[in-house]
Image (cartoon, helix red, strand yellow):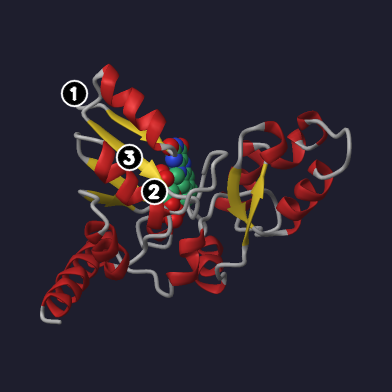
Amino acid sequence: VKVIHKAVAVRHALTAERIGVDAISIDGFECAGHPGPFDTPGLVLIPRAADLLSIPVITSGGIADGRGLAAALALGADAVNMGTRFVATQEAPVHPNVKQQIIANNEHDTVILFRKFNNTARVARNEVSEQALSIEGREGSTFADIAELVAGVRGREHVLERGEMNGGVWWAGLSQALVDDIPTCAELVARVVSDAEAILGRLSGR
Ligand SMILES: Cc1cc2nc3c(=O)[nH]c(=O)nc-3n(C[C@H](O)[C@H](O)[C@H](O)COP(=O)(O)O)c2cc1C
């Protein structure tokens, strides 16, 4: 079994490397999910991780196409992990409205929740995430005040299964701005790889 440790900070990745994991998957601030408290974007995080770690580095956050893969490789990553991009594929087991919403959304359509509770979470901007953010911003509010709004089961049932796009919170990263179709996973991977190869070839000619 290979152990891949997910991290958002190089110092946490270094600890995991010291303990003996096989590879690091490191997320820049752009990512869907939990970007951590440091807000370090990939442009700095990836070369830092590549410089300081000896084990393979898989990077993610904001990567959705061959340009992202080529850039990540240029910055020193060994591989990429794409989350949001794969939600808008034929095979993703979510309601078609979710896939269309990812296409419609841009880089302004995410919000960071739970910063106050030291558990930052980047989710899609919608009525529920806006409401949760507003309650979180109130002085003295606690997680209990938004727990029902942001419950994972609510997002799964209302958004992912029924396609009610304002029914709950759902994960999405800034990379949604780069998504404009719903390919199969095979088409997507082939395209990302061939676009990256073409870009790297063009750059080497400069
Ligand atoms: C729908 C969805 C579910 C995710 N679930 C998890 C999870 O359970 N554990 C985890 O470490 N990361 C999770 N992530 C984060 C991804 O692994 C990845 O770090 C992130 O999506 C990268 O940013 P990107 O969306 O810009 O590609 C999830 C992302 C999405 C979009």
Outermost residue, top side: 19
The residues tagged by marks 2 and 1 sit, at their Cα atoms, a distance apart of 27 Å
Residue denoted by label 1: 1
Specify the label residue 199 is tagged with.
none
User: How packed is label 1: few (under 14 Cα within 10 Å), some, or many (20 or more)?
Assistant: few
Badge 3 element: strand
Quadrant containing the N terminus is top left
Secondary structure category for the residue under label 1:
loop
Q: Residue at x 10, y 81 (%)?
A: 205
Q: CA distance from mark 2 to mark 3?
A: 12 Å
Label 1 is placed on what type of residue?
Answer: Val
Q: Is residue 93 visible in the rendered structure shown here? A: no
Q: Horizontal and vertical percent for residue 31?
A: 47, 51
User: Residue 116, relative to residue 166: is it above or below?
Assistant: above
Q: Which numbered disc flags the more N-terminal residue, 2 or 3?
A: 3
Q: Mark 3 highlights which residue? A: 25
**Is 8 left, or right, of 169 in this rendering?**
left
Rendered location of residue 25, percent (x, y): 32, 40
